[in-house]
Structures are given as structure tokens and as C-alpha cells.
Amino acid sequence: MDHDPVLSRTYDIMNGAIQDGGYWSAMIAPRFEYKLSITDESEVSFDALSEAELAIVDRVYSEFGHVPRFSLCRVTHSFGEWEDPHGSSIPMSYESVLRGVGYSQEEAAASLEYIKEQQALSDFLETA
């Protein structure tokens, strides 16, 4: 998107285009002046996140949590995987993200193969 890379479904939920009856609506208040907030911090659970994922969240918040949104926008535009959509949006592929964070072509290909295998396994188990 023009300002930042955003997951499409998350963006749609944030804007009310999709009504989510799950975790989002239980924990996130409706948008007010382009800002989101937690409805009740006692309801927030991080149980689904690993210690490594929580460490990443802490590091990102520590480094960028104080940065004003349009300054943060300039930061995300420096990411190798971001492309200017010129007023629209462009899907961001796994490969562009992997290449953007420094994976070689071979490493990206191996990771993409692993992702495909995991998705196939997940699809199989879901139908079983």
C-alpha cells in the first residue's frame, strides 16, 4: 500500500470491511482517528506466540514504538521488499520478503519449498 506494507485481511478488518467475530473484535476497539487500541488488556493473550516471537515483538516495539506513524512509513519504505504501488496495492510475495531480508536466491527457494510443504500438510490435516 502507499504508506506501509499491510496484510490485506488485517487492513479490511481494521477498516470494518470484514466483521471478525474472533480475537480481533474481542481485543481491539473500533478505529478512532486512524488509531487502534486494546479494549481490555486483561483479555489479551500471547499464549500462541513463542518466546522468540515475543522477543521480536519486544525488540520492534522498543526500537519503533515511539516513532510517529509517517516517520515509520519512511522506515518501511526502505525495506527491500516494499514497492511503491502508486496509489493502489501490490501483493508482496514470500520470495520478495525473503530476498528483502537478505536471503540468497537458493535460500529463498528452499524456504519457499518448505512453506509449500507445510501448507500442503496443513491442508491435508484440515480435510482429514
Image (cartoon, helix red, strand yellow):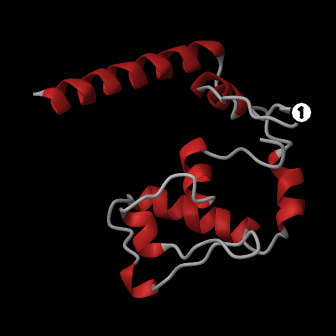
- x and y, in percent, of residue 23 in the image: 38, 65
Relative to 74, does residue 111 appear above or below in the rendering? above
Question: Where the C terminus falls, by quadrant?
Answer: top left
Q: Residue at x 80, y 35 (%)?
A: 88
Instruction: Classify residue 21 as left or right of residue 128.
Output: right
Q: Nearer the viewer, residue 72 or 54?
A: 72
> Above or below — where is 125 with respect to 65?
above
Along the viewing direction, whichever of 115 and 83 lies nearer the viewer? 83
Assess disc 1: are there few (<14), some (14-19) or many (≥20) residues with their C-alpha within 10 Å of its C-alpha: few
Q: Residue 95, position in %: x, y?
A: 61, 22
Label 1 sits on residue: 86
- The residue drawn where x is 70% and y is 30% is 102
Q: Is residue 71 left or right of residue 98?
A: right
Q: Amino acid at mark 1?
A: His
Residue 105 falls in which quadrant of the image?
top right
- Specify the quadrant that holds the N terminus: top right
- Side of 43 relative to 95 (left or right): left
x%, y% of residue 43? 37, 81
Residue 30: x and y, percent? 58, 73
Q: Residue at x 66, y 47 (%)?
A: 6
Q: Secondary structure at mark 1?
A: loop
The correct choice, above or below, for 53 with respect to 78 in the image is below
